[in-house]
Image: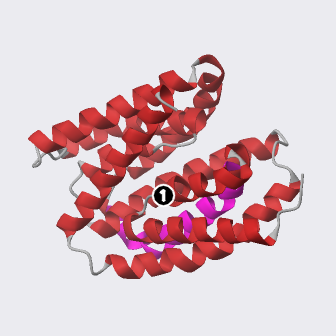
Amino acid sequence: MAELTWDVWVVIALGLAAGGLTKGITGLGLPGVAVPIMASFLGVEHAVMIMLFPTLITNGWLVWRLRDCYREVPELRRVVLMGFPGVGVGAAILYLASDQFLATVLSVWIFAYLALRFFRPELRLSPQARRRFAFPVGFASGTLQGSTGICAPVIVPYVDALGISPRTYVFTFAAVFMSLSFSHLSILWIARAYPLEQLMESLLAVIPAMIFVPIGSWLRQYLPSSIFGRMIRVFLFVMAIRLFYTAWIS
């Protein structure tokens, strides 16, 4: 593996700074923002490998910082519990389904949800529905994480329909992403598919991410809940467009 030059490290730092800022504000966006920036210089696989430790550690920091929100989402244990086997199933699906099929399913799912939110903005899941959907949402999130590298298209609509506060939004996303990242990292470690050079690069990449995630967290307190909700839906819309474009145009 070629040693990364200083200008590539600058690009990595800028991508992680932008992703970390978005992550701190919304609880989303660290891999979604940073990976495309880094991938143009390093390739997708290398960029994803670098993101493993920043994703794990920044989400762990957010979970600890917002741990008082845990009682507001009692279904979280069910979601996380079913995410672990989902990651294993997703890894198997990756070899059976085409990238085009996976990206298309994800984008259609998001568009359908956004249409539902547009026509039914008051939509909220009842306590019974929250518990009933927790297991399948957790399993589907893990499956998508293992097969596509992302789980936001499933977990974000579920959390968005809970009607919780912005702090609890961020805590819930962080807890799910942390658990799935740990599972993914463990699988790579057991399979010895994580080269030492990339491990060290990933650990170094934690620094810029951890500088900007707290800044985003500080900015979040000045955002009204209505603006926060719109930011989440804009993020979903952009993700759906990108998935569809990747599947059928690029």
Mark 1 residue crowding within 10 angstroms, few (<14) / some (14–19) / many (20+): many
**Would you say residue 58 sits in the magenta stretch?**
yes
Q: Position of residue 72 (x, y in %)?
A: 30, 62
Q: Residue at x 88, y 56 (%)?
A: 196
For residue 163, which quarter of the picture?
A: bottom left
On whether residue 69 falls in the magenta region, the answer is yes
Q: In this view, does 193 lie above or below 226?
A: above
Residue 18 in percent (x, y) is at 51, 68
Name the colouring of the figure. Answer: secondary structure
Magenta part mainly helix, strand or loop?
Answer: helix
- The residue lying furthest to the top in this view is 96
Task: Give how far across and how far down residue 223 sits, in percent.
Answer: 26, 75
Tell me if 212 is positioned left or right of 38 in this view.
left
Residue receiving disc 1: 175
Location of residue 182 with respect to 249 vertically, above or below:
below
Residue at 80% of width from left, 58% of height from top?
199
Seen from the viewer's position, the closer of residues 147 and 79 is 147
Badge 1 amino acid: Ala
Q: Is residue 179 left or right of residue 227?
A: right
Judging depth in this view, the residue of 71 and 53 nearest the camera is 53
Tell me where the magenta segment starts and ends, as one range: 48-71
Q: Position of residue 89 (x, y in %)?
A: 59, 27
Foreground residue, 239 or 153?
Answer: 239
Left or right: 162 in relation to 24: left
Image point (25%, 37%), residue name: 113
Q: Is residue 153 visible?
A: no
Q: Is mark 1 on a helix, strand or loop?
A: helix
Q: Is residue 100 above or below residue 13?
A: above
